Image (cartoon, rainbow, N blue to C red):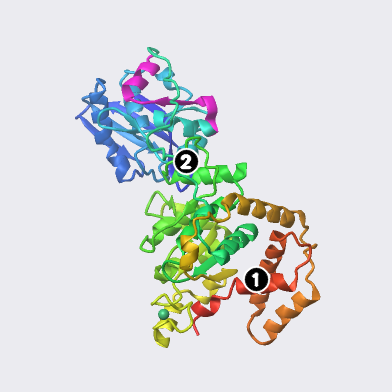
Amino acid sequence: MLAAISAATLTGAVGRPVSVEVHVSSGLPGFTIVGLPDAAVRESRDRVRAALLSSGLPWPLRRVTVNLAPSGVRKGGAGLDLAIAVGVLVATGEIPAPAVNGLAFCGELGLNGSVRHVPGMIALADATAPLGLVVPLCDMREASLVRGDEAHGVATLSDLAAVLRAQAPWPAAPLRSDDRETPASPRLDLADVRGQTVGRHALEVAAAGRHHLLMVGPPGSGKTMLAERLPGLLPPLTPAESLTVTRVHSAAGCALPEGVLVTDPPFRAPHHRASIVALVGGGSWSLRPGEISLASHGILFLDEMGEFPVAALEALRQPLEEGVIRISRAGGTVTFPACFLLVGAMNPCPCGEGVYPGLCQCSVVARARYARRLSAPLLDRFDLVVPLARPDPDELLNPEPGPSTAEGAARVAVARERAAARSPGDAAPFRPAASRLIADRLRVGQLSARGVHKVSRVARTVADLLGSDAVTEEHVSDALSLRKARELVVAQ
Ligand SMILES: [Zn+2]
């Protein structure tokens, strides 16, 4: 009266194999689950019993004990429901034990016997290899991505019982994975943006050289509109990046695109009231990836950056440096990718008019307090600190579309090729006038040593965008103008 069923549980973005041992014995009827289950797993008892009964399958009026092994690993979520139900059916002889040999089961049960979506199916599918894997029909394409024909989908517990009793074949794969699918969002195009020559140029420089970008401008200067169009300038994800991004989005339970694999660079724009856990990841047991990981190989856009709590902004510094985030909790330590291009937007001052000389009504004290919200080390992460003004009415009313995203993306692709073709020791030479301009700014204290490094990097990207083999004075002065807004947001 003992059954052992293979399953898996999710920790962070990694699946861990779990053996679900079900023991049915005589004695007072009862149902106990042991082996570090979380609250959702403990509630499995009610879901499993209801699902079996509503599927026309018997519930044993005996003592049922479920042990989740290994007992040292915490088990989170409802994805063990299906394995527990199958274990009960095998232990009571409703399903022949040989039928489950070589199979693992991952799925949540509805009270009506439906088999429901669980997050992180890609990681769970990895963890159960080389066993065949039975998953919710809606998750089958996700599981098939890594397990191919070894993944089987079922929509209900009674469908599964019929297959395991050799009364029916495995259901066919669905054409669409499920109703979690988001309709393909229309690609936002830079052709919709009127004017904004400086902003457009800054986007191309950011995309070409992977420079973090802070846009400083009053409300209505189009900061959000520009940021949303930056992913379109980035090259499509490489196959390896695509798989990394898809795994993280799967582990977070995000809707995946029609073809399962995420192929476009992600764009994430968390609100400034989002919790630190939502931003960087974590949580008590299941250790979910946060926005910075969901933005990997894409854009993390922080609108109204000055409104984010200081602690949230400071939490970005380590991942910005390392490209990964490590989260330690009692449940263990997990590492998520966090390799994103950071785009911030903020007002220059509380009244927002600080980019226009003479218009700002803020006191010196108020401006200084506002500027202090971004710490110097965080501000230093931005190679580009660009002042934006509202487009003038003529530009706004111009019916002609602006230059398109496709044109910009082509320039970015060429610039990236130029940079990639250079060996590290073979950087584009700086013309004497270009070096002189940087040295002058350093001498008068307008640039720090770190600033020199950043301006040089940006100037090189500008040269790459213009197809120039050498970095000229014009490229350097362009790079200097692309950080001009620093003086507006640096605490004096
Ligand atoms: Zn102001």
Which residue lies under the disc numbered 1?
A: 479
Label 1, label 2: how far apart the Cα atoms are: 48 Å
Residue 149 counted in the magenta span = yes
Q: Nearer the viewer, residue 366 or 152?
A: 366
Q: Nearer the viewer, residue 70 or 406?
A: 406
Residue 487 circle label = none
Point 57% across, 43% down: residue: 242
Q: Nearer the viewer, residue 114 or 198?
A: 198
Which residue lies under the disc numbered 2?
A: 16
Q: Say if 393 sits above or below 262 in the image.
A: below
Instruction: Tell me the kind of residue under disc 2.
Output: Arg
- Of all residues, the one furthest to the top in this rendering is 167
Residue 146, x across and y down, in percent: 54, 34
Give the mark count.
2
Q: Say if 175 sits above or below 197 in the image.
A: above
Residue 422 shows in this picture? yes
Residue 73, x across and y down, in percent: 42, 45
Residue 44 placement, left or right of 134: left
Label 1 close to label 2 by CB (< 8 Å): no
Residue 26 shows in this picture? no
Q: Which residues are magenta?
A: 146-165
Ligand 1: which quarter? bottom left
Magenta part, dominant SS: helix
Residue 457, x across and y down, in percent: 68, 67
- Of all residues, the one furthest to the left in this rendering is 28
Helix, strand or loop at label 1? It is: helix
Residue 23 placement, left or right of 375: left
Instruction: Tell me the kind of residue under disc 1.
Output: Ala
